Amino acid sequence: MEQMIIQLISGAVGGNAAGTAMKDLSLGTIGNTIAGLIGGAGGGQLVAMLGSGAAMAGGSGDIMGMVTQIAGGAGGGAILTAIAGMIKNKMSS
């Protein structure tokens, strides 16, 4: 459970960071947060399935597992926010 919370929080942060860094792809604060939450959950799960150590953390508080979950969540959130922003831009033009 704590892994999912870490993924969601880091995904939301990653989504908002991507929206701030790439103004043309931003979905607004709420849109960036929602896309980040979804992308964070997906990215964190993908990293865990790839066996980068996050799956072995198992909620034991292992610092490397936690760092991997944060990186996967933030990366997934940023990527999904950028993709959703590109789709939004294509549909509006």
Image (cartoon, rainbow, N blue to C red):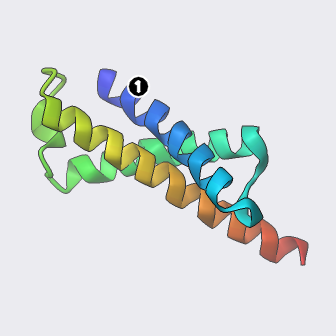
Does 45 appear above or below 83? above
Q: Quadrant of residue 90?
A: bottom right
> Which residue lies most toward the right here?
93
Q: Is residue 2 visible?
A: yes
Binning the other alpha carbons within 10 Å of mark 1 as few (below 14), some (14 to 19) or many (20 upward) gives some
Circle count: 1
> Which residue lies most toward the front here?
21
**Left or right for 9, reference 2:** right
Residue 64, x across and y down, in percent:
14, 37
**Left or right for 20, reference 59:** right
Disc 1 target residue:
5
Amino acid found under the numbered disc labelled 1:
Ile
Residue appearing at x 45%, y 53% in the figure: 76
Residue 31, x across and y down, in percent:
73, 44
Q: Is residue 1 visible?
A: no
Residue appearing at x 65%, y 40% in the figure: 34
**Left or right for 93, reference 48:** right
**Left or right for 81, reference 46:** right
Residue appearing at x 90%, y 78% in the figure: 93
| SS category of the residue bearing label 1 | helix
Residue 16, x across and y down, in percent:
62, 44
Q: Quadrant of the N terminus?
A: top left
